[in-house]
Amino acid sequence: MKLVQENIAQPSDIIKAFEFSPMGIFLVSTNGVIEKTNHKSSEILGFSEKELEGKSVDDITHPEDKHIARDFMALAILGKSKGLTAEKRYVHKSGKIVWAKVSTFSVSEGDEVKYFIAQVQDVTAVHESNVKFQHLMENSLVGIYIHQDGYFKYVNPRMSEIMGYSEEELLSTPAKEFLHEEDKPIAVEMMRKRLEGEVESIQYELRVKTKDRSFVWVEVLGSTIIHEGAAAVMGNVRDISSQKNSEAQLKKINHDIGKRIRELNCLYQLSQLKNKNEKEISNILSEFVHLIPPSYQYPEITTARLTYHNEVYTSSKFKESIWAQSEDIFEDKEKIGSVEVFYNEERPELDEGPFLKEERILIQSIATMLGSAIAKKNVLREIKEQKEKFQAIIENTKEAIYLISPGFKLLMFNKIANQRNNQVNGYDLFEGQDFNDLMNPSTRGVFTRMFNDALKGKYVTKELKSQGRVGDSYWMRVKIFPVYKPDGQLMGVCLLSENIDDSKKSELELRESEEKFRSLVEQNLIGVYIVSNGQIAYVNPGLEKISGYTKEELLGMPEFLELVHPEERERIRSIHKARINREGAPSQYTFRALRKDGSVRHIDVIANITTYNFQPAVIGSMIDITDRVLEENRINEAVILAQEKERYQIGMELHDNVQQILVGTGMFLEIASKRTNDANYLEKTLSSLMQYNKEAIQELRRLSHQLAPVMNSDSPLIEKIDILLSRYGIVDQLNVETKIDNFNVPLSEAVQLVVYRIIQEQLSNIIKYANATELKVKVGSLNETLKLTIEDNGVGFDMNQKFNGIGFENMRRRAQALGGQLEIDASPGNGCRLSIEVPLT
């Protein structure tokens, strides 16, 4: 020790500087023993100066960090190292851990190391702030990021969870590559506005690309921070995809919250400025640069520029010129900026161009002073940055955050937590409050169990339904995890609570809607299906019934076309392809299907394009219309048969009547041509020919009227019916009773034709089959409806055998064409009663 003391003997002013240095200083012998220390070292470690002097450096060093000093001293003694700056842990007299930034260098005489000098700076506060900040970031329920120079500089696990990428993928890819093309402009503009100071904070919604190439909607909230000495944007990202159906309400909520955040940020910044005791580095540089020109010999033509990392500060009326002087600024041997001075006009050349030798010393002194000031400020800045980051997170999140001691006392909370407590309990929170007082009885047991699990080192997340002050209930997502001090000692438990009432209600409503839809589809007799990638992805019981296959068999088919008749498969494949490609496929079509038993069924399909598992698919419904198709075929065949029968009847009428009359006429004409000189015979012949001609005209008129009666709406219906009865000779064969109303308005031609044809058809049936003696025809109206009744006392018939004949089917279709209906009541031996009702208009 005596040797070291002799080596370090210095004037008294240096000793005073040593004793009252703002940094701890050790003089250490080559064997690692502390020979001399100062008051600041004692203050940092809790030992008195006498207690420290004589101790080995290892005695006060954390076991895991002892190698740092040992390795350096060994290298220094071997002449392989002159100095070292490192962070290491010391053990305080009380046993707590002290983090320190230590700069050590050797003092030699010739090639021999005499002793070591170590400068010690306490940075424990920085580490504690880092730990708190890291715990909160890593366990947040929302994604958190730091964005700088187009890249993410930090993302938390929740950010990776939202986007599906690993942390490495997010940090190594330009941030804009994760954005939807349509949203890139707004994101770039928002980032520019915040970095250029146009807005206090940013809040917007956009779509981000996940690793599976889908897009999710997120809400972004952010504000400017200083990260690694440069401006950056820190923000949080919340997945809002499940809430987009309530977008209008959410936008209003986000807008209101954004306003609150901006107001809180403004108040926070104002509070910070108001309570600052010392200026920031930027303030010092911006003010100091104006003090440089007056110090030079020609202040009126002198301007100055200070550069600090990427920041530039200039004096008033700054102008760069060729007459310049500069000096670099260093912090711990690292260049961090420069001082530049310019003359804007040429002056006589002196020691350094137009500058004096003393001005070189001046600029060197300025650079040295700025380096010292910045070094001191940066320690404070690091602590401040950590606090600002921590504060930005807790104040810009929508989560209520509480830090609770192991004794269940409230240590810290954010403003959202206080606002929520006001809403639920009606009063403000305060530090030291018993957290039991804040819990609702309905959830106290669950909270207590979660709290105890967190004290044991567990991370617990639950969704809970709680009650408010007035009995109303709401959903919240709660996450609880332990928080430790830098030395590993349990500090307490952090509780994060987020109100998820809106999303929970939307989830429950969606689930209820899906259950209703599923119940409707599953109970529907109509077949419902979804085809994705050419395979059946979903069927309901209705389709099982139509196809004859089970659900499992349908879902296991290689392709849906196995249900289609082979002759139809190419057509159906083309329709399906056109629909998937959105090329104008018909939305409704029919095809023949093959059931499991091999039978052919006629199917009517309505189909549309949809999305299934993020892929285009076809959803459709199908109805078995086989019975309808068969019935239509039967009716068409019957109609054709009736048409052929009617043609045959017309041919017979023409052959038996008109043709015979014309044949007779021809015979008379032939005879008359041979007796042209017999005037009496010719007169008789002409009389007969006129009679034959009249009969032919009447017969053709009868046939024409039968085929296409003249339906003049101005003539009464009763006249047409009387003519019809007389032409069929009904009045001569049967006892006929008619009762036909005079309608208030003329009947349309369509209504008259329907009534005429139905009476005509039924009279034909009565004459041919009924063997009746009495006939009643009634036509009347009631409530804008025409009613026709035709009744006979004939032999009747079995309706099960004859009711579906073509004659009755034609009459029914004529009535239905006008929106009416037809009814028939008949049985063997009891005659027949036919009635129709059709609208008058």
Image (tube, rainbow, N blue to C red):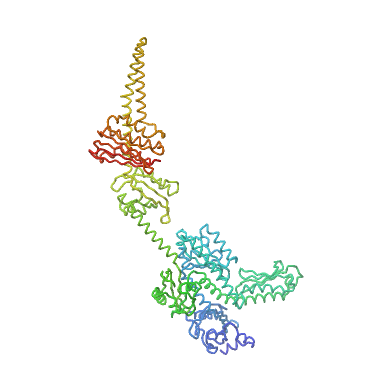
Q: Is residue 450 above or below residue 705?
A: below
Quarter of the image where one finds residue 449 = bottom left
- The x and y percentages for residue 521 are 36, 54
Q: Is residue 452 above or below residue 567?
A: below
- The x and y percentages for residue 764 are 30, 33
Q: Is residue 600 above or below residue 795?
A: below
Q: Nearer the viewer, residue 791 or 45?
A: 791
- The x and y percentages for residue 790 are 30, 37
Q: Nearer the viewer, residue 335 or 178?
A: 178
The answer to whether residue 728 is left or right of residue 133 is left
Q: Is residue 107 visible?
A: no
Q: Is residue 301 visible?
A: yes
The answer to whether residue 740 is left or right of residue 416 is left
Quarter that holds the C terminus: top left
Looking at the image, how many numbered discs can be counted on the residues? 0
Quarter of the image where one finds residue 42 = bottom right
Q: Nearer the viewer, residue 427 or 670?
A: 670
Please report the residue visible at 41 percent of the width from the left and 37 percent of the height from the top.
Answer: 746
Q: Is residue 748 above or below residue 230?
A: above
Q: Residue furthest right?
A: 348
- The x and y percentages for residue 446 are 39, 74
Quarter that holds the N terminus: bottom right
The answer to whether residue 315 is left or right of residue 670 is right
Q: Residue furthest left?
A: 829
